[in-house]
Image (tube, helix red, strand yellow):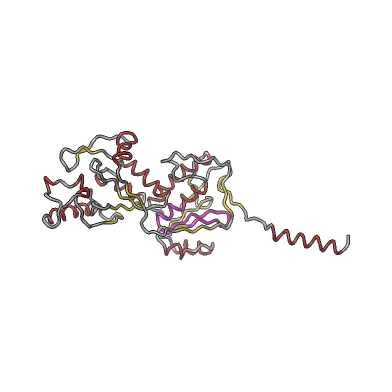
Amino acid sequence: MKLSNYLSIAVWIFLLSISFPVSAKEVVWFDGIHPVNFSYQTDVAPVVRIATDMFVSDMKLTTGMSAEQGANSNSQILIYQMDGAKKSVVKKLRKLGIDTDELLRKMDAFCVAVRNGKIYAIGNNGRGTAYALLELSRMAGVSPWVWWGDNVPERKEQLSIKEGFTSMQCPSVERRGIFINDEDWSTLVWSHRSFEPSDYKTGAVKGKRLMQIGVQTYKKIFQLLLRLRGNMIWPAMHEGTVPFYQVEGAMAMADSCGIIVGTSHCEPMMRNNTTEWSVDERGRFNYLTNQEQVQDYWISRVKEVGKNENVYTIGMRGIHDGDM
C-alpha cells in the first residue's frame, strides 16, 4: 500500500475520533437484579427520613424492589446533609470537585453528583437533602403526582447516570408553598369521610359542627410539597374546618416534613378566627376596643407553637373577611 493511502487512513481515524468522542461511563445504580442501595454519610433531619421512605417506595414502583439502606462503604448512593457536617466531610466533597461553598450559601440548595462510580445526594440543610433524594426519584421517572394523580411510573430494567454528572439546584424564591382554600367542597369532605374518617368536632363557636382534615392527609400534602420543592403551607381555615393546630399531630407532622406553617389574609398570628374566636366568650375581635383579649388570644398560640419554623402575620381584618 502506498504511503499516501496510509496517511489517508490515519487522517480518517483522527477525524472520526473527533466527531465521535468516547461517551462517559454509565454508573449503574439499578442493574435489574439487586435493589437500589443507599446510606447516610452524616446525621440527617427528620425530613430526610420522610423523603427516604418516599424514595424507598418510589424504587419499588420503578424497579420492583424497595431501596435498601446499606453499609457506608458499599452503598451506591451516599446521602449528605451539609449543615452540621464535619470539616473532614466538606474537605472530602471538595476533593471530588463539588462546590460546597456554593451549596452552603443558598437556602434549601442541593446537588446530585456522580464521582468514581458513586452517586452523591447532598443538601445544604434537611430540606435540600430531601430534595436531592427525591430528584433521584424524578430521574428514575417518578412524577410528583405519583400518589395524588395515580401517576404510575414506567417499570425500569436498569437505572444509570453518567460518570462526572453534576446537577446543583436551588430555589429562586425563599418561601414556596400553597394555601388550602375553599376546602369545604373537596379536601375537607374527602379526608373527613373517606381517606381518614373522623367524628365531627365542636369548635369555639357554639352550634358549629366541624369536619377535620386529618394528619395523614396533611402528610400526603406535605410529601407533595417536598416533591415539588415547596417548603410552606397556609392550612385550611374555613368555617366548617377543624383548625390546623387543633388537629392532633398536625404541627409535629409539618415539622418532621420540613414544612413552614403560616396563616393567610384574615387569620393573623397562627390563629383561625372563624372557628377559634368566640364572641360570646371574648367579645368583639377588635384590637382598638378589646386589646387585652386579642393579645391573650395571640400570645397563647405563640406559646403553643413554640420554636417551630413559622411565618407570622399580624395585620387584622374582620373575622372571615367581615367588617370590624
Q: Position of residue 110 (x, y in %)?
A: 45, 57
Image check: 50 left or right of 206? right
Farthest residue to the front: give it: 323
Quadrant position of residue 184:
top left
User: Would you place residue 194 above or below residue 114 in this image?
Assistant: above
Task: Indicate whether residue 130 is drawn in magenta.
Answer: yes
Please state the horizontal and vertical placement of residue 284, each as a whole percent of the image: 13, 50
The residue segment tinted magenta is: 111-132
Q: Nearer the viewer, residue 181 or 303?
A: 181
Q: Residue furthest right?
A: 1
Q: Quadrant of the N terminus?
A: bottom right
* Residue at 85% over, 64% down: 4
Q: Position of residue 179 (x, y in %)?
A: 32, 49
- In depth, the one of 37 and 168 nearer the eye is 168
Q: In the image, what residue occupies the spot 70% across and 61% down?
A: 18
Q: Is residue 163 magenta?
A: no
Direction from residue 188 to residue 290 in the image, left or right: left
Number of labels in the image equals: 0
